Amino acid sequence: MLGGLPFGVALISACGAPNPCSGHQFDRLKRYSLPYAGHWVVARGDTLTFPDAPPMSDRFRLGDIILDTSTIIVDRQCVFRGRLAFRAPKPDTIAATWFGQPEQAIVSGWPVDLGPFAGVSLAWAGRDSLSGSILIDAKLGVQAQPGMTARFVAGRLSSRP
């Protein structure tokens, strides 16, 4: 017995999986992610064009991207919480997850009823603006084709009046 627990239970607890939201790898992920954190408002964007499926084109309008710094564990990976707010086809806000890399941030999550999308990729386009593109979900069998566009620019929502 060790502290009231059988020795085997104490040994298994001590050897359990480490917390993915701590340690060197997470510190690095957090350092790359924090500059992207905040509330971003989509200022302008391309229309989404599906050359082979015109009825699916222009079915949505992304309004806001909110990248929070609270963490969540998904598939044994620590990522950050976020939200995507849509203005069309109906006002809706969905939960998303995200993480930053040196060259971009990846936001995962998309309403299933809006099409074969996985999320958005964001890259710096200025000191307080991001350029984004819609990510296609390859698991659904859709491949991005030449002529299929969906890019946007977002600015940081100012907390000043």
Image (cartoon, rainbow, N blue to C red):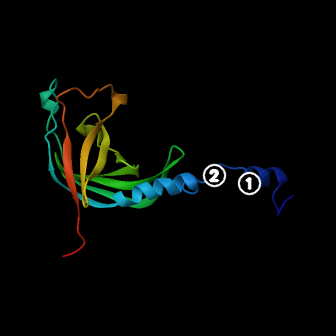
Percent position of residue 154, x then y: 21, 54
Percent position of residue 74, x then y: 48, 47
Rendered image quadrant of residue 111? top left
- Rounded to the nearest angstrom, the CA distance separating label 1 from label 2 is 10 Å
Looking at the rendered structure, the number of numbered marks drawn on it comes to 2
> Circle 2 is placed at which residue position?
18
From this view, report whether residue 109 is shown above or below residue 66.
above
- Image quarter where the N terminus lies is bottom right
Percent position of residue 123, x then y: 29, 49
User: What is the three-letter code of the residue carrying label 1?
Assistant: Ala
- Image quarter where the C terminus lies is bottom left
Side of 3 where 115 appears, left or right = left
Query: Is residue 62 at least partly visible in the picture?
Result: no
User: What is the three-letter code of the residue carrying label 2?
Assistant: Pro
Give the camera-side residue of 2 and 80: 80
Q: Alpha-carbon neighbours of circle 2 within 10 Å: few (<14), some, or many (≥20)? A: few
Give the camera-side residue of 21 and 126: 126
> Circle 1 is placed at which residue position?
14
Which residue extends farthest bottom? 161
Q: Residue at x 54, y 51 (%)?
A: 25
Give the camera-side residue of 9 and 125: 125
Side of 60 where 39 appears, left or right = right
Rendered image quadrant of residue 36? bottom left
Q: Alpha-carbon neighbours of circle 1 within 10 Å: few (<14), some, or many (≥20)? A: few
Query: Is residue 92 at least partly visible in the picture?
Result: yes
Helix, strand or loop at disc 2? loop
